[in-house]
Image (cartoon, helix red, strand yellow):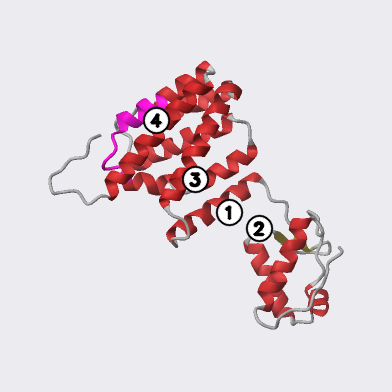
Amino acid sequence: MALDYQPLNRDGLARQIADSLRTAILTGDLSVDERLPTETDLAARYGVSRPTIREALKRLAAQNLIRSRRGPAGGTFVNRIGLTEARDSLRMMVTLMVGMDAVTLADVAEARDVLERVCARLAATRRGPADLEALRAALAEQRDPALSDEDFCAADVRFHRAVVEATGNAMLGVQMVGVVEALQPVLNMIIHRVRARPRIVAHHAAILAAIEAGDADAAEAAMGALMAYVGERAGEAQMRRRPGREPDR
């Protein structure tokens, strides 16, 4: 390990040390599965106490960047972050950002519209039998009139996840977590009273038909139509409607 141990500002030492180690991991100075120096060694190199090092390591562990192992061959090691961990982390982060007003639902909706259209186009040209089966299964579930709102929402998320999976692009899969899976349940809870399930199902059916046919233009257009409908319903849900006024579904 070749780290540049720079002098530290005495304020926020644990945060600065965590930032230093995180940078080393991101740049490759600390490799995946590499063992970090002991707490005692790190404390000596940074000129701080062991509790400060322990706090810094806790910060990194909370981000799944390091893991600890007990025993003679134990220690603290750089973690190998898989797609599942990346998605879970992004899902939590985006949900927190929206909850704290760091980004708006309108920002997320716009990003989703762009990315969903791209995914629909790619899915139409790259989908395989398993992808089509997943899309059909999610759509069939949504057609069940006895399905609860919560289960309909879950099936909705599965349908869009299947579209993304059909692209075969792992990075798109990670990105779409932030604009679909993290907020789709929240969005559905906002608009479920003003949306019509048959309309959602019809849009999904059109998307599936285009993907099955391998028609990228039709798939993008069908996805765009769904995004427009969802956007209208979200706006309707947030409007202060007059008593007795029913939305146009």
Real-space Cα separation, disc 4 to disc 1, in angstroms: 30 Å
Give, as a single range, the part of the protein colored magenta: 191-205
Task: Name the residue nearer the viewer: 6 or 55.
Answer: 6
Marks 1/2 in contact by CB < 8 Å: the verdict is yes
Question: x, y percentage for residue 54?
Answer: 70, 74
Residue under pointer 3: 179
| Up/down of 152 relative to 58, above or below | above
Which of pointers 4 and 1 indicates the residue nearer the eye? 4
Real-space Cα separation, disc 2 to disc 4, in angstroms: 38 Å
Residue under pointer 4: 225
Task: Give me the residue at 45% from left, 62% from top.
Answer: 100
Which of pointers 2 and 3 indicates the residue nearer the eye? 3
Residue under pointer 2: 64
Q: Tell me if residue 202 is in the magenta stretch.
A: yes
Question: x, y percentage for residue 245?
Answer: 15, 43
> Relative to residue 214, is residue 71 drawn left or right?
right
Q: Give amino acid for label 3.
A: Val
Q: Give amino acid for label 2.
A: Asn
